[in-house]
Structures are given as C-alpha cells and as structure tokens.
Image (tube, rainbow, N blue to C red):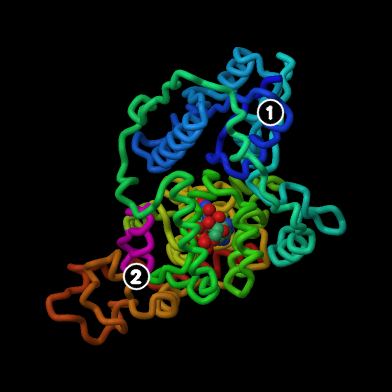
Amino acid sequence: TRALCWFRRDLRLDDHAPLSQALINHDEIHCVFVFDTTILDALPRQDRRVEFIWHAVAELKETLRQQGSDLIVEHGDPATLIPRLAHRLGAHAVYCAEDYEPAARQRDTRVAETLKQAGIAFHALKDQVIFAKDEILTAAGRPYTVFTPYKNAWLARLHPRDYATWESKTLVSRLARHDDTLVMPSLDQLGFGDTDLCTLRLPLGTSGAETLLKDFLERMDDYAQTRDFPGIKGVSYLSPHLRFGTLSIRRLVKHALEHGGDGASTWLSELIWREFYQQLLWHFPHAATTSFKPEYRDLAFENDTARFEAWREGATGYPIVDAAMRQLKRSGWMHNRLRMIVASFLVKDLLIDWRWGERHFAELLLDFDLAANNGGWQWAASTGCDAQPYFRIFNPVTQSERFDPEGHFIRRYVPELATLDKRAIHAPWKAKVLPAGFTLGRDYPFPIVDHAAQREKALALFGKREG
Ligand code: FAD
C-alpha cells in the first residue's frame, strides 16, 4: 500500500516517528512539504523564518534525491492540497507529526475530515515531545500547572523507550522513486525576499543542527554555571532547530541523560520546560489570547506607544534592555536571561500589556513557538500559571550587574557605550564620572522611566486585583 508523509515542523529524516511508522506499515511512501499560505500570507515579505524553513526543506529534498526519491513541495492551503495530493497518489494514509498549537489543531482536524471522506486515514503521531498532552497528569487526572511537580512527574515516568530513536534514516532508500527532479519554488516564487539570515552565525538545516549540537556537547558540563550570562557562550543555541524539528527531541534527551552531571541535568530541565508549556497550551488554549490567571485579565496597563517604540528599538536608556532588544532585532534570537529581563521591564517598568511584547517577539524570534513564548511572557508578567508572585519585579540595573558584570554583552550591542567602564555601563545616569567625549542625552538616552517609581505603580496595578 501507499502512504504520504507530510513534513511540517519536523524537517529531518533522522529519528522521525511518522516517517518511520509509514515505512513500517506501507510499501511506497511519498514525502511532501507545503509552504502554507494561511501562515505565510500574514507575514512581512522578508522573514528569516521562511528562509530558514526554505533552506531546511531544500536540504531535505536534496538528501531524498540522493536516495533516488524526492520531496514534493507545494505552496497553498494544506487543508486542500494534502487531501488532493493523497488522492492523486492513491495513498491509503497520510502520516504527520502531531502539532499542539490551536491553529494547527484546527487545520489537522479539517484535513483529517476531508481525507476520511475519501477513505484515507490520517495519522498524527507524537514526535516533537517526549510526553504529549495528557501523558503527564496529577494523581487526580488533571494537568499540572506548576513546573516543579510536572518536572518530577515527567522524570519519574521517563523510561528508555520514551527516548528510543526511530529507525527512519536508514530506511529512506525504500521511499518512492522519483527519477525526474520535482521542482521546488524559490523564495521569490513564494513571494519573499532574501533576508540577512545567511550572514548570521546560525548554521542551517539538519547539518547546521548537528554542528551546533556537537559544539554544545563539548560545553554541556559548564551549562549550569554559564547559562545565565549572555556575554558567555553558555547555552546551546538550538532553539530554532528544535522549533522546526531539524533535530529530534529524543536524541537531545538521550544525550543529556547519557552525559549526566549538573550541566546536563539543568539542560534537561529546560527541555522539560518546553514540554511543560506545550501541554499547558494544549489543556488551556485560552492562555494563547488572555491571562492564564483570570484575576489578571484586563489589567489597566498604560500602554504608552512612545515607550513601546523605545523598547522595541532598544532606546530605553537601560543598557541591558537596549542591548537585548538590539540583539533580537539584529539576530532574531535573544538570550533567555535577557528575555526575562526585557519582558519584566515592558510589563512592570513600562506598564505595557504583555501581549504587545509577546506579539513583537512572535514577529522577530527565529525560534518563535507559541507555547514557549506565551508561557515565557505570562511567567514574566506574573499572569501565568506558576507560583510566581506579581511583586517579584526584576531590577534591570542589578540584573545587568549580576549577569553581564564586565559589560561585554552591552558593549557588543550598544557601541555608544563602549567607552564606559564596568561600573558606569549598567546605569550611566548614576555614574559620577563619564568618559570624555561622551554626553548622556546626546550619545545615549536618559532612562525613559524611573525604575523605583514604576515599580510602585506596577505593584499598585497588580495589587488591586489581589485585594
Ligand atoms: P538552551 O538554554 O540551550 O535550552 C535548550 C532548549 O530548551 C531550548 O532550545 C528550548 O527549546 C528549550 N527551552 C529552554 N528554556 C525554555 C523555556 N523557558 N521555555 C520553553 N522552552 C525552553 N523559547 C522558544 O523556543 N521559543 C519562544 O518563542 C520563546 N519565547 C520566550 C519568551 C520569553 C518572554 C521567555 C522568558 C522565554 C522564551 N523562550 C522561548 C524560552 C527560552 O528563552 C529559549 O528557549 C532559549 O533562550 C533558547 O536558547 P537555547 O536554544 O540556547 O536554549
């Protein structure tokens, strides 16, 4: 029998659950990727993510070509295209990796219904997580809403079969033969212009993911000590690859467990955070649009557009915030410690609705993932599910002194401050002496708000809801 394997955010052949299942159950497998117009139409005409995907798809296609097969690449609405293609190929089933985002779930339901009418089965299989949806529940059968008990339950349930890798790469020689190369639309034909993606230090495709992984495995022991310092190469930088599935989560978990030690176990915790937020979004899809905690819905944020603009552009006068926001703009990525700092700053210093910040991140992050981004923003805004009290407010200056003590990171992204020493650089407006030739207000802005005053306002704003 024949089957179609539909690639989405799982752009690899190695350890691929749906492909592997399809190969086990069917004799002839065709592979397809759809550039989905329902997603692409809403994006600006230059988008690093589209280009990242394009490169990953091109590499996937080339690897399949080398095996005598090919990747069918379509452009349009998958809800129509996938059933049509499955029908045209005479497929008995369509296989794909299960997606937990609300829009993807709706799309898959539509595809499954159309396929069913044509007598074609639809198999959405767990692939992007170790434990999906309702596999980790409390004793009362409810979803966890606090991370640590979730993590403990996750670890207690973990068995080697949960991260055993799927045999798929070695089987690809059994895929449907394609003697003539199938055409793949160029970025231009998809309606997108080139971005600066290729000039960033982000290796692309599955080969790029392997390069990053290899590099990180050598540094994994130091992860617990270095992960919070944006000026140090401490983290894995794998997030865009995890987002688009150019690496499998099972392999990463396996590496962490086999490696052992503090670094590896701290890193494993981060991978568990990823799953925590994914299951949360599955169980509480309302959080995608509003506060998880009902008491923090419709807070009276000030939402000053000029301040929002200063935040977006990295011109708030708080060096660590500005450096972080410029890193995001320049590279499409931001260090986790900085994501926490700038998110707290937007909500609790600028008193701007966390959803504005969430949207800005969603537009720029190469690793944008609805569950992680929403979870991170709600965590920082204290509107989320965990036990974080609203009065824990990050001080951007002390955070800066602690996590970028020498100011290396700030100097890299805010060159105007390059001549300031490590005492002055975190809060230039407080410095007794500034370098000759440097004038605050001319070369770099004064802070647009006073942290202490804004902190009081934030406490009052949130506190009212507690009372
Ligand atoms: P590492 O430290 O090497 O961690 C390894 C992997 O674990 C990451 O690649 C990621 O997949 C996962 N991970 C790590 N931390 C978290 C976390 N807190 N929540 C969920 N998963 C995590 N991560 C995204 O992947 N996409 C997002 O859109 C996103 N938005 C965020 C927004 C805010 C406000 C905050 C505070 C965090 C956000 N994160 C997001 C989480 C985290 O910042 C990034 O995953 C991390 O910085 C990616 O870098 P890395 O791959 O080097 O991470």
Please, what is the three-letter code of the amino acid marked with disc 2? Phe
**Compared to 44, does 370 lie above or below?**
below
Q: In which quarter of the view is residue 9 placed?
A: top right
Q: Dot 2: what SS? A: helix
- Is 277 positioned to the left or the right of 329 in the image? right
- Residue linked to disc 1: 109
Q: Earlier in the sequence, mark 2 or mark 1?
A: 1
**Badge 2 local density, few (<14 within 10 Å), some, or many (20+)?**
many
- In magenta segment, residue 320: yes
Q: x%, y% of residue 262?
A: 61, 75
- Residue linked to disc 2: 409
Q: Nearer the viewer, residue 300 or 289?
A: 289
Mark-to-mark CA distance, 2 and 1: 46 Å
Q: Which range is magenta?
A: 314-331
- Is 467 positioned to the left or the right of 391 in the image? right
- Magenta stretch, main secondary structure, is helix
Please, what is the three-letter code of the amino acid marked with disc 1? Thr
Residue in view at x 65 percent, y 23 percent: 28
- Is 7 positioned to the left or the right of 61 in the image? right
